[in-house]
Image: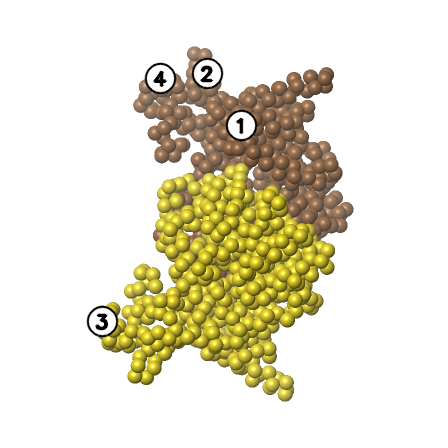
Chain colours: A brown, B yellow
Amino acid sequence: MPRSADTREIPLYRQLAALYVQAIAAGSLRPGMRMPSVRELCQRHQVSLTTALQVLRHLESQGCVEARERVGYFVREPDGMALPGAREPELLEPLPDDPSVFAGINERISMFLEKARRAGPVPLDLGSAMPAPSLFDARALNRLAQSLLREQPDILVYGPSAPTTHPEFQQAMARHALTFGVCLSPADIGATHGNSEAVTLALDAIAEPGDVIAVESPTFFGILQAIQVRGLRALEIPCSPHTGISLEALELAARNEPRLRGVVVVPHLQMPQGSVMPDAHKERLVALCVEYGLALIEDDIYREFVESPRALRPAKAWDKVGDAGQVIYCASLSKSFAPGLRQGWMSAGRWQARVQMLKFARTRNMQTWSQLLAARSVDSPAYERHMRRMRIQLRLQREQSARAVARYFPVGTRLSLPPGGISLWLELPPDLSSTRLYDQALQCGIRIAPGPMFSNTGRYEHFLRLSCGMPFTPEVEEAYRTLGMLMERQRTELPLRRAA
Amino acid sequence: MPRSADTREIPLYRQLAALYVQAIAAGSLRPGMRMPSVRELCQRHQVSLTTALQVLRHLESQGCVEARERVGYFVREPDGMALPGAREPELLEPLPDDPSVFAGINERISMFLEKARRAGPVPLDLGSAMPAPSLFDARALNRLAQSLLREQPDILVYGPSAPTTHPEFQQAMARHALTFGVCLSPADIGATHGNSEAVTLALDAIAEPGDVIAVESPTFFGILQAIQVRGLRALEIPCSPHTGISLEALELAARNEPRLRGVVVVPHLQMPQGSVMPDAHKERLVALCVEYGLALIEDDIYREFVESPRALRPAKAWDKVGDAGQVIYCASLSKSFAPGLRQGWMSAGRWQARVQMLKFARTRNMQTWSQLLAARSVDSPAYERHMRRMRIQLRLQREQSARAVARYFPVGTRLSLPPGGISLWLELPPDLSSTRLYDQALQCGIRIAPGPMFSNTGRYEHFLRLSCGMPFTPEVEEAYRTLGMLMERQRTELPLRRAA
């Protein structure tokens, strides 16, 4: 539902359409079900015939319903489902670096980011995996902020005191972790600047320059950057788009790579493929890390974006703290509730003391303000309500995006709809280049995240990550159409160039 | 002046005494001047004889005034001035590491910090160089925060966008830099988590593991930590307590140390000695760095704490950006206006692009909230008013602390009152150990910063940093008396132990 502050600007028929779009996403109206008729809509919502008809036509244009002649409108099967699914990786052993590419992962990422910066503000950012601001409960957060300022008027002038993490934050996150089956000692919870700092501190703690860190392939480029700036080497392990990292390939690496110190995984909605690791894999992964003495850096930033009837337990739940404490658990509120706070946290198992020391040496203490706000957010009833709403809205946006891919992208494009999250990972036909598409799209005011950003191996040139973070407006649909056209153009230009 | 919210709890005579204490600190009542008589005080402030007498007796007990029989009360010369001053360093060449000490600087700092943590909240923290929360303008900052939340109700849910630093913050800091004679391009200003992150990013940018960084000796332990966790080696350069780092010794190091990559200086109120580098030294320092290709990391966190009739220009003002951009300028609002925001910034000269990339790889984007609040703070008229008030208050507290040192510490203690700042650096008689004093004081609920925290050379065992950040209450005075007693006890225990 659009927030009430905005409703005055949105035409009535769009508001009503949004209601039905959400009902479809939430599953209360399922594919194949008959929609209310024009007359029924008039009565139900006290609107004119014109408005009621507009509602149904708008839903049709969005691909949510289809008209069957003389019968009425019916909820449509999402098109995205009709696309061929993502393929399993071919190799199940560590992937060789492309030496011509490896040295420059940061330069390459910086190059993409620099191009984006030069292009200035882009009307359509399909490149960053963030939910749009309108998907958050800004009002609830603002209320919490105002009441914190009233209750503790001096909070912004209180400087650092000895412990770097506030006890109220530690307790709130420990309680929060209990809700998904992990029992953490509050004293072992450290606040960080987003989960990026958590992952980089974990890398600092477990490895020395020249050491090797296993990562999923493909993986979030931020992890590759963090590994490189620390002077470490990333070893890419094939990753299933459905079950996550290949444990066989990881074990092979653990046996053969003497400088392997740890592995970074995103167990829930792996970035960019969107896989959710089955519990049995998590258990085996932890056992494997204990056996080979590897640190398991678990980046659990997308857990709450998984659509699942039950709470998913992270690998940390299988970590026997007294025994080893082999898992460094990293999380954040940046994606789920309060992007503007950049409030992350971690619990580093047996590296806890070292992580604390490194944190103090690098960025010292944290805002009390942001920690208390985060603690109270997680504790407030608004939090779960908000997450439920956001999951429904994102599912809708993913499905709308997948439909647009099916409609506008070249035949042969592969996509598995992930069971949650903020983005889609696409495999384009192999003659297309996402690097070129990036440049072309930027000129049209559209930002995407090209495949090569997610690996050192040079393997993902015809892959693409697209954000589903923003509501699927006609402008977003138009952007998908433009991307489709640009890919067609790539194909017509290629033979020409060869002929020249 | 105590803030009005608190006045109800403070007896009238203390309020009036505080007024005169401030007048003395501000110089409107100078040493040797006659104080108003009891009768004059009664008339002037409409108080009883008893209250007026209490005011003068309280001022006397604080060491601010002295009674001359049958004449009246007179403003006293601060006692601190009577102490022998700090000594110039003996050597003017790079100081050799103590190999038994070097390896463990972080472990040693961690050991002190860990002891402090275990001791729990300490009633009297003379260990951290922070102004007390009561010295800040919490009300002005809270008002700014509330109005920002009203004006931009979504500010806490806006996630990162492409540039990591907000343009409004960049412009405000560039304008701010102009007020002290430095012209920076807004685009070259990067927001950081305090100035700690700024300094660590600078180190990341200029050096590789194994490289050497010159530092002042003694220096802030955070700088030594940052150097070590990055795998670099700190080379300590003797530092005058009056003019700062020895340029002769630095040049010697530049000639003889092939892996020397840069130098970190705190030009204004060097930590812990409190020296302010003369302009001529700054100019020569920049020239020297250009000549030898060294990065000059300028940590200017205490500039606004210098009591000076004119704005002090940092070394960055002598940096010819077009030519070299050899100075990496680091600053923060954490000490001066809003400790709770942890808002620092930097301008990295020719390392700017690299610093931006490293920042993005490590902690990604910054809070818009905190950046806008900092930008508006610096732009508000409350800022300069607050800094003037704080400088006066800190001067008073430094003088009161110095008097207490003169009164309670062993003969032979050396101290030069610094021309500003939040702390005093003391040289104790050489038979005393500040490491032992640290342990003993902690047991009495007092935290201090012992000399060995500030060096890898093992040179400062009989040195001590004491914070003057909190108002000089009777409890603080009592802490000084206790420290004096503990030092006496060290002396009486030592011969006993030798006899045993």
Q: Residues within 10 Å of mark 3 (few under 14, many from 20)?
A: few
Instruction: Kindly identify the amino acid type of the residue bearing the numbered disc 3.
Output: Gln
Is the residue under label 2 in contact with that under label 1 (CB below 8 Å)? no
Q: State which chain disc 2 sits on.
A: A
Q: State which chain disc 1 sits on.
A: A
Q: Residues within 10 Å of mark 1 (few under 14, many from 20)?
A: some
Q: Are marks 4 and 3 on the same chain?
A: no
Frontmost residue, A86 versus B483: B483
- Report the residue marked by disc 2: A67
Is the residue under label 3 in contact with that under label 2 (CB below 8 Å)? no
Instruction: Kindly identify the amino acid type of the residue bearing the numbered disc 4.
Output: Thr
Q: Residues within 10 Å of mark 2 (few under 14, many from 20)?
A: some
Q: Which mark is residue A221?
A: none
Q: Are marks 3 and 1 on the same chain?
A: no
Residue A99 higher or lower than A431, as above or below: below
Q: Which mark is residue B43?
A: 3
